[in-house]
Amino acid sequence: CSTNAFGMGVDKADIRYVIHFHQPQTAEAFMQEIGRAGRDGKPSISILLRAPGDIELQQQIIQMEYLADHEISSILSILTATEERDEKKLRELLISHGVSETQARTVIHLFLSGKTSIELMTQELSHRMELKLDKMYHLSALLEQKSCLRESLLSYFSEAYKPDHTQNQCCSRCGIDLTAYEQKGEGNKMEQFDNWRSELNRIFGLQSEGELC
């Protein structure tokens, strides 16, 4: 169970499943995240669960990063009023003024790279938003194709796919054998849940209810 930061640096060798509950924002993010599975070379699988509202969700997330002119003006006033140029400290400063962390990171990067006017920053933010939306729609279209998913993804990155016809281990479009991923035997039975307080005491090794904050 993870956030979308899962693809950023998890290096656990024996991950068997990567399951996406929503469609990722870009093909780059998707490949980065599913690449966490099977690093030990053993069979692993990526499962993507999609629903019609996924595109609207990602679209809203992308558009939330955009800032109106009056918001940019306020942020620039804060940044120009301080001599601080450490990115972390500037980010903390903007967050304390109600700017989201994602917006703060983007604006500070632009500010420190010389885009210190409302016009330049608006142009750059608009360009970034359009680029992200294009990537999102591209991935959605790719996933809607009836052709091989693996081939389509690799083609996006200008890589060729040479299928191994001796194994039925490609994708859901071409056919895939899920036998290797099926649960064998009985799983552990969950204990009866009686009381949240006693359950927390058990989890954290507390001796009495009085020790629970």
Image (cartoon, grey):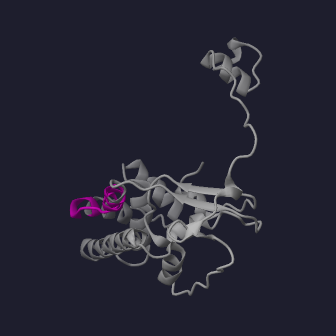
Q: Is residue 201 above or below residue 71?
A: above
Comparing 88 with 47, the one in front is 47
Residue stretch in magenta: 56-72
- Residue 25, position as x, y percentages in the image: 43, 64
Q: Is residue 16 visible?
A: no
Q: Is residue 116 above or below residue 208?
A: below
Q: Is residue 9 left or right of residue 27?
A: right
Task: Choose top left, top right, bottom left or bottom right for residue 65.
Answer: bottom left
Task: Choose top left, top right, bottom left or bottom right for residue 198.
Answer: top right
Residue furthest to the front in view is 166
- Residue 66, position as x, y percentages in the image: 30, 63
Task: Identify the residue shown where x is 64% and y is 70%.
Answer: 168
Q: Is residue 81 left or right of residue 196?
A: left
Predominant secondary structure in magenta? Answer: helix
Comparing 8 with 25, the one in front is 25
Q: Is residue 13 visible?
A: yes
Task: Identify the residue shown where x is 33% and y is 55%.
Answer: 52
Q: Is residue 2 above or below residue 35?
A: above
Task: Identify the residue shown where x is 35% and y is 73%.
Answer: 128
Comparing 45 with 62, the one in front is 45
- Residue 147, position as x, y percentages in the image: 45, 76
Q: Is residue 114 above or below residue 59?
A: below
Which quadrant of the figure contains the C terminus?
top right
Give yes or no for residue 63 being in the magenta stretch. Answer: yes
